[in-house]
Image (cartoon, rainbow, N blue to C red):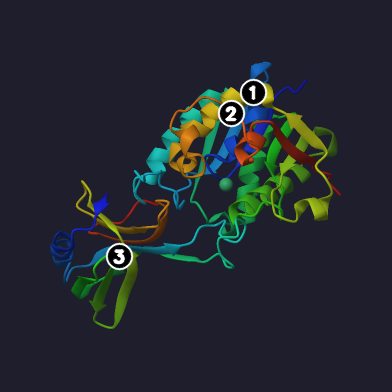
């Protein structure tokens, strides 16, 4: 992955407009957050292979960045994004890493389902 | 002497951090060790430091790290259950326990190492420990292996008393270190100097030096 280049991510988002696409959306503070007393709560959520269609997708902010995908009847939102990659399968991988390089948030789009 | 040791944990690196020295002790003396690793740790948040893995590349990277760590510890046989990280507690426990029972019948271990259900912090640890205990409890009493359970919840010593098995592994620390290094996507964050190839043992009394000296377990008693 590389630090987010806003224009490259914006054109990648445009590439997925108005198509059925697969979404991986995740946020986590780690399964050991409470155990290591980094936080008072262990929190996390993810959806893998949600199938969505969005007619507007925008990246904003000055870094860390935010992404919003506007669907016909709803939204997908992620904040804290720092790094991106367009992988060999043409998937857009966006992630937010903390100072230790640990993943804290991820938003990924693909035309084919992600591996289980 | 043990005839065969069966190790059952959910994540690549559980075998190394918790009991790599103990495993190496067995393999060094010629005791075969089989490791059942339930997931590929797909949802870990450690990606290396500096990070080199992505959410999508992590499973393959961790699978390769696992193979390397098994080699370092002398684990002869690795059985991957193909489950997904963070989902074990949502699977059907009867199906999982039947799978473990099948492996127990085949391997016929004299000793099983697994997590102490309820005292192992991560939901996957507790869930897999629980189905493992369930599977073993269903064996006829005379066929049951010994079971050492690993626990590290903050209050586990208060609730369980001190562990009864305290294993001095200092003679095996190089092997454990090699396995820790093999799991680089995970270990670089905790032990950057070790993971990046420094070979000298740490001198200070930190968590790593403790980890290289002893490993402790509770003997599980079936009621
Ligand atoms: Zn684990």
Q: Which sits in the foreground, B1 or B205? A: B205
Disc 2 from disc 1: Cα separation: 6 Å
Residue matched to label 1: B172
How crowded pointer 3 is (Cα within 10 Å; few <14, some 14-19, many 20+) is rated as some
Q: Is residue A69 visible?
A: yes
- Left or right position of A24 against A19: right
- Tell me what residue is drawn at x 62 percent, y 57 percent: A35
Residue matched to label 2: B176
Q: Is residue B36 above or below residue B83?
A: above
Return the mark for residue A64. Answer: 3
Disc 1 from disc 3: Cα separation: 44 Å
Q: For residue A58, which quarter of the picture?
A: bottom left
User: Which mark is in front, 1 or 3?
Assistant: 3
User: Which mark is in front, 2 or 3?
Assistant: 3
Q: Are marks 2 and 1 on the same chain?
A: yes
Q: State the residue lying farthest toward the front.
A: B204
Q: Position of residue B198 (x, y in %)?
A: 47, 28
């Amino acid at each position: 992955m590389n630090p987010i280049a806003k224009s490259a991510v914006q054109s990648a988002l445009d590439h997925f407009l108005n198509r059925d696409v697969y979404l991986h959306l995740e946020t986590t503070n780690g399964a050991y957050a409470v155990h290591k007393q980094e936080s008072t709560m262990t929190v996390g959520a993810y959806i893998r292979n949600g199938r969505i269609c969005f007619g507007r997708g925008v990246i904003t902010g000055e870094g860390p960045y935010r992404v919003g995908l506007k669907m016909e009847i709803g939204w997908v939102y992620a904040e804290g994004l720092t790094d991106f990659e367009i992988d060999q399968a043409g998937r857009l991988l966006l992630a937010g890493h903390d100072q230790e390089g640990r993943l804290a948030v991820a938003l990924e789009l693909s035309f084919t389902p992600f591996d289980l | 002497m043990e005839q065969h040791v069966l190790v059952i944990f959910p994540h690549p690196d559980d075998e190394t951090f918790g009991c790599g020295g103990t495993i190496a002790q067995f393999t060094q003396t010629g005791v075969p060790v089989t490791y059942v690793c339930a997931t590929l740790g797909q949802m870990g948040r450690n990606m290396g430091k500096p990070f080199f893995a992505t959410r999508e590349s992590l499973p393959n990277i961790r699978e390769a790290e696992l193979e390397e760590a098994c080699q370092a510890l002398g684990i002869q046989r690795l059985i991957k259950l193909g489950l997904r990280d963070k989902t074990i507690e949502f699977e059907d426990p009867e199906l999982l326990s039947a799978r473990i029972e099948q492996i127990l019948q085949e391997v016929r271990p004299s000793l099983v190492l697994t997590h102490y259900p309820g005292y192992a912090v991560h939901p996957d640890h507790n869930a897999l420990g629980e189905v493992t205990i369930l599977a073993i409890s269903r064996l006829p009493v005379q066929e049951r292996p010994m079971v050492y359970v690993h626990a590290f919840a903050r209050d586990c010593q208060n609730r369980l008393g001190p562990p009864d098995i305290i294993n001095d592994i200092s003679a095996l620390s190089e092997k454990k270190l090699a396995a820790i290094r093999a799991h680089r996507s995970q270990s670089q964050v905790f032990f950057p100097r070790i993971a990046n190839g420094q070979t000298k043992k740490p001198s200070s009394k930190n968590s790593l030096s403790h980890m290289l000296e002893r490993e402790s377990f509770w003997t599980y008693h079936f009621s």
